[in-house]
Amino acid sequence: MQTRQMGGTMAKLEKYLGYIDRTNEWCGRILSYLVPVMTILIVIEIIMRYFFDAPTCWNNELTQMIFGTYAVLAGGFVLLRNGHVHVDLIISNFSRRTQALLFIILTAPLFFLFTGMLLYHGTSFAWESLLVREHSQSAWNPPVYPWKMMLPLGGLLMLLQGIALLIRNVVVLVRGEEPVVARDGKRGDA
């Protein structure tokens, strides 16, 4: 009976972790289309500036806003794909269980501190900007509050993926099994 309940709980857990993975996977795929957009914008600016001696007043700022959005929202996707830089010369020699324990003890607290601060301060930053309908101080003068609202959203996506990663490492530590596999077949481990 207890084993059956545990199996049902694990199935539900895998389902919720799958939702988080798919959300960050979807977000990462959508964001990937921003790279060619930024490239085109930069090429346009170079052509306008150096060939026509007529730089735009909007291009540089728009490119910065797009890149900021890309960088902030991609955090959860990069975490899902285990793409963040980490040095694992020593830790890679440990058993998978020991790696999970080290992740839980060392990495997770720092990660949650960082994402908590990003969420808290990012939300405050975005809210203040939204309240005053903040605009840039440039000649172009676009609204910046929509872009600032990406900070808490990116923090939330990264927090959710971090929770999924923590759960997967707890499963490894407790059950000795590999973490639940993400939809794309990649492991969601430390």
Image: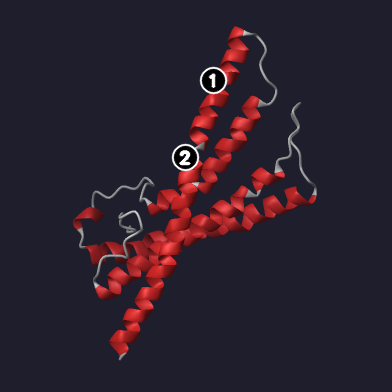
| Residue 80 located left or right of residue 157 | left
| Residue under the image location 33 percent in, 82 percent down | 6
Q: Earlier in the sequence, mark 2 or mark 1?
A: 2
Real-space Cα separation, disc 2 to disc 1, in angstroms: 18 Å
Q: Identify which residue, 175 or 113, lies in the foreground.
A: 175
| Residue 121 located left or right of residue 85 | right
Q: Is residue 14 above or below residue 27?
A: below
**Residue underneath mark 2:** 32
Instruction: Estimate how packed mark 1 is, as few (under 14), some (14 to 19) or many (20 or more) residues with alpha carbons within 10 Å.
Output: few
| Residue 163 located left or right of residue 96 | right
The label on residue 81 is: none
Q: Is residue 82 above or below residue 2?
A: above
| Residue under the image location 42 percent in, 58 percent down | 21
Instruction: Identify the element where label 2 is drawn.
Output: helix
| Residue under the image location 34 percent in, 48 percent down | 86
Residue 36 visible in the shown view = yes
Q: Quadrant of the C terminus?
A: bottom left
Identify which amino acid the numbered label 1 is placed on.
Val
Q: Quadrant of residue 4?
A: bottom left
Q: Identify which residue, 8 or 160, lies in the foreground.
A: 8
Numbered circles on residues, count: 2
Q: Is the residue under label 1 in contact with that under label 2 (CB below 8 Å)?
A: no
Q: Position of residue 119 (x, y in %)?
A: 59, 57
**Residue underneath mark 1:** 43
Q: Identify which residue, 125 or 175, lies in the foreground.
A: 175
